[in-house]
Amino acid sequence: MNIDDQHGRFLSEYVERPWGWYASTFIADGFKTKVFSVNPKQRLSLQSHAHRSEVWTIVSGEGVCYVDGRCCKVKANSLARIPVGAKHRIENTSETENLVISEVQAGDYLEEDDIVRYEDDYGRQGK
């Protein structure tokens, strides 16, 4: 299938982070897809987004997902729904295996600067 800019476009953006990496894969009007991998015993910042919701599908690994103060264990085929404005984070609880997640973002603004960090293991608090 050939997707043009009228319907969206494929991306090949790969970004390393202190907790692992993410790759943006597709963007269209109102949504974006990513894959991200969290290294063993690492976690993302406690964060929120003002303009987008997210749905995470766990592809492999095991961890703990936090959304607005609720905590649940996740593993392959688990889903997490993160509403706009919800404080959230995910943690890899494995000693040896990466936690791999497929993410779908939906909203009117999908850039990386739509993030507020409340807690961060790597000193990146704030916007």
Image: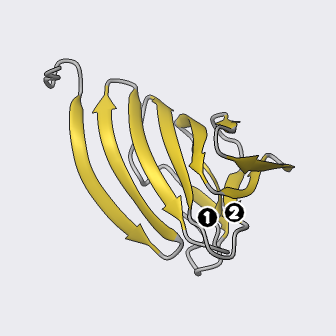
Residue 59 rendering spot, x and y as whole percentages: 55, 45
Q: Nearer the viewer, mark 1 or mark 2?
A: 2
Amino acid on which the number 2 mark rests in the picture: Glu
Mark 1 lies on residue: 44
Q: Secondary structure at mark 2?
A: strand
Look at label 1 and name its amino acid: Leu
Other residues around mark 2 within 10 Å, as few (<14) / some (14–19) / many (≥20): many
Point out residue 19 in the picture as x, y percentages from the top left corner.
54, 72
Residue that label 2 marks: 91
Above or below, 6 relative to 49 = above
Q: Quadrant of residue 125?
A: bottom right
74 on left or right of 35: right
| Cβ atoms under marks 1 and 2 closer than 8 Å | yes
Residue found 48% across the figure and 35% down from its top: 105
From this view, report whether residue 52 is shown above or below residue 126: above
Q: Is residue 64 left or right of residue 30?
A: right
Q: How many marks?
A: 2
**Residue 76, located in which quarter of the rendered image?**
top right
Task: Give the percent coordinates (x, y) of residue 54.
Answer: 57, 37
